[in-house]
Amino acid sequence: MSQNSQIRNSNSVPGEKTSIHDMLKDTPAQESKNNHPTHSGVTAYSRSIPNTLSNSSSSPAILTPSSPTQSNEATILKTSSRIENLKNWSISTYKCTKQLMFEKLGKTARTHDAELETQIDQLRETQKKYINILRLARALTSHFYHVVQTQHALGEAFSDLAQKSPELQEEFLYNSETQRNLTKNGETLLGALNFFTSSVNTLCHKTIEDTLQSIRQYEAARIEYDAYRTDLESLSTKPEGTIGLEEAQQGYELHRQNFMKLRGEVAIKMKFLDENRIKVMHKQLLLFHNAISAYFSGNQQALEATLKQFNIKVKAPNSAYPSWLEQ
């Protein structure tokens, strides 16, 4: 034992590093990279760059950002397009405003289609009259609805008194039955009135209004057309080679085509509207007349037959019937 100790001591060199930490300090970086020595089960720190990162530079589509020049060009193009649209809109608005002012002052001529404009005026007047009929029909329906509700309540009151007044039981029962019949017929008439007001409302505020919207577009196109026509006529009187003449001709032709197209569409729409209006109102006026006549003449069978003819469903008697506002 002492011999081995002596041999080990005789072979040792002064200043020899016997600690594992001292040995790792002298290990070359490459060796540490390849061998990966560990201490207490933890991998030693390595400063080498992983292969995955070193190879990632071969993928320029991932790491290379988009060119700022392309983004700037797209922004410039979008901005210039908006500026151009704003410029065109401003010029068109100025010309149309000038045209309207000159027309009111009588300083310029306007395109006038006497036949079409007469039909447009008649349509607007017809809509006003139909809206007045709708207003009165709604008022009648509302008032009659309250009458029916009152008759129903009165019939219930007569029936209650008939049970509590034996001396007048027969008279109360007779009046109670009369009010119940009137309530039933009134509910049937209310069904006809609500159907009438609903149909006239659709005609006034949807069918006619759709055609009037096309007419408003046509009138706006007429003003634009006249504005560019006046502008072209003004430039045509100047010497040849005037700046802006070609552009004025192009603008005039574009607005002329749009104006002619809308005028044709309005003429067709008004024709079909007139046919549809006559058809709808013929049906509704026949319904209104037959229902009112049958109710106030006390002809219950004729009243029910009128509603069947027009496929109108009526709620059961004594049920809570909605007012015309809920239709």
Image: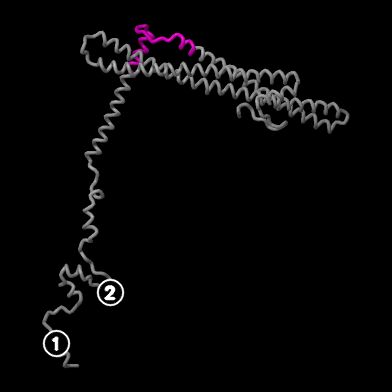
Q: Quadrant of residue 293?
A: top right
How many residues crowd mark 1 within 10 Å: few (<14), some (14–19), many (20+)? Answer: few
| Local SS, label 2 | loop
Number of marks in the rendered image = 2
How many residues crowd mark 2 within 10 Å: few (<14), some (14–19), many (20+)? Answer: few
**Front-most of residues 225 and 154:** 225
Give yes or no for residue 6 being in the magenta stretch: no
| Disc 2 residue type (three-letter) | Ser
Dot label at residue 40:
2
Q: Is residue 234 above or below residue 32?
A: above
Quadrant for the N terminus in the image:
bottom left
- Residue sticking out furthest to the right: 167
**Front-most of residues 292 and 264:** 264
Per the picture, the main secondary structure of the magenta-coloured stretch is helix
Instruction: Find residue 169 and report its horizontal and vertical position in percent.
Output: 86, 29
Instruction: Find residue 64 and report its horizontal and vertical position in percent.
Output: 23, 48
Instruction: Find residue 126 and report its horizontal and vertical position in percent.
Output: 54, 14
Dot label at residue 172:
none
Give yes or no for residue 98 being in the magenta stretch: yes
Lateral position of residue 264 relative to residue 31, left or right: right
**Mark 1 or mark 2, earlier in chain:** 1
| Disc 1 residue type (three-letter) | Asn
Q: Quadrant of residue 78?
A: top left
Instruction: Find residue 93 and report its horizontal and vertical position in percent.
Output: 34, 19
Q: Which residues are magenta?
A: 93-120
Dot label at residue 9:
1
Residue pictured at 33% horizontal, 12% vertical: 229
Residue pictured at 13% horizontal, 79% vertical: 16
| Local SS, label 1 | helix
Quadrant for the C terminus in the image:
top right
Q: Is residue 47 above or below residue 101?
A: below
